[in-house]
Structure formats: structure tokens, C-alpha cells
């Protein structure tokens, strides 16, 4: 029997593991990552801890650190097929397609029945233009499990690209019917309908989705844009933007906070070039900033929490969906974006968040003022993702970036940035206020 001190240490360690897992269940991933970092800090850390840590880091969009964690786990347990699949997922996020393919293929050699790896490999084949091979893989997955939403959406998108619109719509409709809460299925089906100008069919899909998931900003965003497309809603007026879009000054442009943030962000391991699954183009995007012990990020998190509380007080008295459906509990996620040269962000929404925003850490001096007639570097709201296929002309609302300024707005508003070609870099922190369900 182990000595009492050893038993107490074992119980304490197990309690911390359960605490980390509970934080993951609560979607408090930053806190969970900090705890997993402690749990894996010893040479005795088991492979399982490293696998769990890597999964949390993936959830935080820190793919570079996740890859390190998965490599550590696989060094300890190289025969775990799911670990090779997870490693491949991290490599995809880092844009390393060939290495990702090798990881997926190794996972399948270890376990030919591992559906996640087969689906990931099929998606990779699809992205790289191996359409015949991808179609065969999708159909095999669906033969094995007709409820596989990801495979059905993948097949539907592939058939659309191959010009087989009727079959594509059939597959995508089935995907959403079988998984009515899948935002991926909704976007794929709505996009296909919009490219055929079937606005009303797409609107019905969005309305059903939002009725099922009323806190999902992605569904609300698509529904609002389709209502505008059919003339059932007008675009937001300047008065409405004034009510829903708020700005706060958190620090002076050259404050110690901003200087410390700029230095810390520039050194982040998780800062990678234009991740393929994000809206950033010709720029760098980081993983999550909060949950660690880095003081500049802690100070920013404290300031943001206060500003979000002020935002609710200012905006929460309304009678629209933002106020009526306000979540009872939230967490704040944040990440860094570093743009220079002609870097910009495509129009997008934050589907899982309720309120989003941007804090400007550093901006080129020439971004502000009347000299910037082309609004280079500005935040633009109102334009939609061009891939959706919507055609009605939309107007834009612009916000000029100023270092030290925080902008908050509903997550269901499409937003983007204007490329800036002027000297200097633009460092900002993206923010999501996410409902805890």
C-alpha cells in the first residue's frame, strides 16, 4: 500500500485533472489550458494528459502549441491512431497539407476504421483537387453511417463544384435535415440556394435554424442578410449603428499597456501566417491570449471585462434580439491579428459568440484623418462574405482604428477590414463574448 503522503498527492493530482476536464466542459478553455500546462510540466506526465492538452490548444486556435503537445503525446504512445489524426488536424490549421496527409494516413494504417481520419483525408483530397478520390471516400463514409453530417456536407459541396447542382442540393438538404443544428450544413445549403437565387428557400432554412438555436449569431446573421435580399428588412441605419456599436478608450495610444501588448504579441509562438480557416489574408493570426500568467494580457482581460459590462448597460435596454436573447453567462475569448503591407480581413461573422469586438494596440499614423480618403486599415461593417452569392448592393459603415480604442458590436454583424498599403504595422486584438451553455 502506498504511503499516506503519496496517496494524498495522487488524490490531489486526480482532482486537478477532473478540474481541467470540467473547465473544458464549461468552455473555459484558457483556464483549462493553464491547468493542463501545469499537469504536463513533469516528465512523468502520461500521454493521455498531453493528448487532452493538445485538444484544448486546438480549441484555442493555438495550432503550433497543439502540434508540440501531440508530438509529445505520440512520443509516449506512438500507436494511438486518434493521436495521429489530431496531429494532422493541427497541421491542417498550420497550412502544412503534405505533413497532415501523412498523419491521417498513419492514423488509418493503425486503425482503418477510424472515421475521423478518413473524413479528414477526404476533405484534404477535396481541397487539393483529387475529386474522384474524395467522392469515393465521402460515399464510403456515408455507406457506413448515413448520419455522418461532415461527410454529407463534403459530398454536397464536391458535387456542386463538379457542376451537379441537383445532386448537391439533395445531399446538402439531407445533411441539414439529419443535423438541423449544424451551422456547417446550413452555410453550405444556403450558399448553394443563393447561387441559384432561391432566396426564399434559403431564408426558410435560416429561420428554422434560428428557431432551434436562438443564441447562434451565425444563423441570425444569415437570416438578416436574406431578409434584406428579399426586401423584408432594410440595412442598418447610422442611428442603429450608433446604438449597437460602441467604442471605449482603454488606454492612450503610446501607453505602457499598448507597448507591452505589442511586444508580447510580436513574440507569440501561436502567431501564424493567414490560417486557412480564418478571415485573415496576408497577415498573422494568433491563438487565444487569455488564461495564462502573462501580465499584459491579464491587464487587457480585466479592462475588457469592465467594458463588456458597460456595453450591456448601454445596449441591453433594447427590445431587439440582442437584448431579448442575452445569454445569462458568458466567457471572453481573445486573439491577436498582425497586419502589414496589404493585409486585411474578409467579411465574416463570429457565429458562436454573442458580442464581438476589436481592440487596437498599434496602428499606422496615416490610418486616421482626412488624408486617408480610401479608408485604408478601417473596420468596415455591412458587406457580406462574397462566397455566399448574395447580389443586392449593400452600404458600409466605417470605424477608424485608433490605438487604445475598443470597438464592441453584435457578433451577427458582418465585418471586415480595408487593406492598408501604408508603412507600419497594424496590431489588434479580436474579442468574442461567448455564451456558456
Image: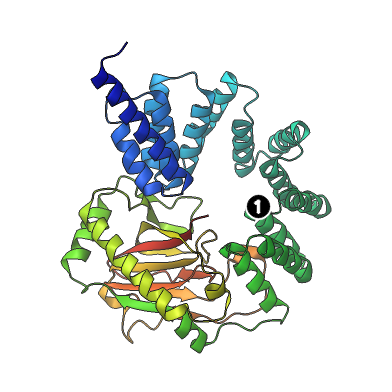
Name the image quarter holding residue 124: top right
Viewer-proximal residue among 239 and 9:
9
Residue 235 in sight: yes
In the rendered image, the quadrant that contains the N terminus is top left
Q: Secondary structure at mark 1?
A: loop
| Residue farthest along the left direction in this orientation | 256
Residue 61 vertical placement versus 42 (above, below): below
Viewer-proximal residue among 201 and 8:
8
Q: Does 402 sit left or right of 115 as displayed?
A: left
| Residue farthest along the top direction in this orientation | 1
In this figure, which residue is indicated by the disc labeled 1?
A: 182
Residue 322 vertical placement versus 131 (above, below): below
Position in image of residue 68 (x %, y %): 36, 33
Position in image of residue 186 (x %, y %): 68, 57
Viewer-proximal residue among 268 and 146:
146
- Residue at x 54% of width, y 73% of height: 322
Q: How is the image coloured?
A: rainbow
Q: Does 257 sit left or right of 47 as displayed?
A: left
Name the image quarter holding residue 129: top right
Amino acid at each position: 500500500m502506498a504511503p499516506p503522503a503519496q496517496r494524498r498527492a495522487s488524490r490531489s493530482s486526480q482532482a486537478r485533472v477532473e478540474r481541467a476536464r470540467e473547465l473544458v466542459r464549461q468552455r473555459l478553455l484558457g483556464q483549462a489550458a493553464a491547468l493542463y500546462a501545469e499537469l504536463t510540466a513533469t516528465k512523468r506526465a502520461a500521454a493521455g494528459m498531453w493528448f487532452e492538452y493538445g485538444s484544448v490548444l486546438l480549441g484555442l486556435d493555438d495550432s503550433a502549441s497543439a502540434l508540440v503537445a501531440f508530438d509529445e503525446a505520440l512520443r509516449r504512445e506512438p500507436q494511438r491512431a486518434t493521436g495521429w489524426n489530431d496531429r494532422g488536424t493541427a497541421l491542417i490549421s498550420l497550412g502544412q497539407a503534405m505533413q497532415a496527409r501523412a498523419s491521417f494516413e498513419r492514423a488509418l494504417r493503425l486503425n482503418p476504421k477510424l472515421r475521423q481520419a478518413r473524413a479528414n483525408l477526404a476533405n484534404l483530397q477535396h481541397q487539393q483537387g483529387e475529386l474522384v478520390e474524395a467522392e469515393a471516400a465521402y460515399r464510403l463514409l456515408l455507406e457506413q453511417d448515413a448520419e455522418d453530417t461532415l461527410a454529407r456536407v463534403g459530398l454536397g459541396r464536391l458535387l456542386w463544384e463538379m457542376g451537379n447542382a441537383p445532386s448537391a442540393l439533395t445531399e446538402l438538404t439531407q445533411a441539414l435535415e439529419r443535423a438541423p443544428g449544424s451551422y456547417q450544413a446550413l452555410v453550405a445549403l444556403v450558399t448553394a440556394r443563393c447561387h441559384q437565387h432561391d432566396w426564399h428557400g434559403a431564408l426558410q432554412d435560416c429561420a428554422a435554424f434560428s428557431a432551434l438555436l436562438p443564441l447562434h449569431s451565425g444563423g441570425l446573421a444569415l437570416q438578416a442578410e436574406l431578409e434584406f435580399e428579399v426586401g423584408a428588412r432594410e440595412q442598418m441605419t447610422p442611428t442603429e449603428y450608433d446604438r449597437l456599436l460602441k467604442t471605449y478608450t482603454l488606454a492612450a495610444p503610446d501607453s505602457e499597456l499598448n507597448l507591452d501588448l505589442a511586444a508580447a504579441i510580436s513574440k507569440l509562438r501561436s502567431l501564424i501566417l493567414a490560417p486557412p480557416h480564418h478571415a485573415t489574408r496576408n497577415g498573422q493570426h494568433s491563438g487565444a491570449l487569455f488564461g495564462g500568467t502573462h501580465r499584459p494580457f491579464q491587464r487587457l482581460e480585466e479592462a475588457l471585462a469592465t467594458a463588456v459590462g458597460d456595453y450591456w448597460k448601454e445596449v441591453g435596454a433594447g427590445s431587439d434580439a440582442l437584448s431579448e436573447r442575452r445569454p445569462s453567462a458568458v466567457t471572453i475569448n481573445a486573439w491577436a491579428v498582425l497586419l502589414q503591407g496589404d493585409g486585411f480581413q474578409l467579411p465574416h461573422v463570429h457565429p458562436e459568440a454573442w458580442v464581438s469586438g476589436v481592440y487596437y494596440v498599434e496602428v499606422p499614423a496615416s490610418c486616421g484623418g482626412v488624408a486617408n480618403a480610401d479608408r485604408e486599415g478601417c473596420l468596415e461593417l455591412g458587406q457580406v462574405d462574397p462566397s455566399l452569392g448574395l447580389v443586392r448592393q449593400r452600404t458600409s459603415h466605417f470605424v477608424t482604428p485608433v490605438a487604445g480604442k475598443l470597438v464592441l458590436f453584435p457578433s451577427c454583424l458582418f465585418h471586415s477590414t480595408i487593406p492598408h498599403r501604408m508603412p507600419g504595422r497594424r496590431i489588434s486584438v479580436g474579442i468574442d463574448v461567448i455564451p456558456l451553455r
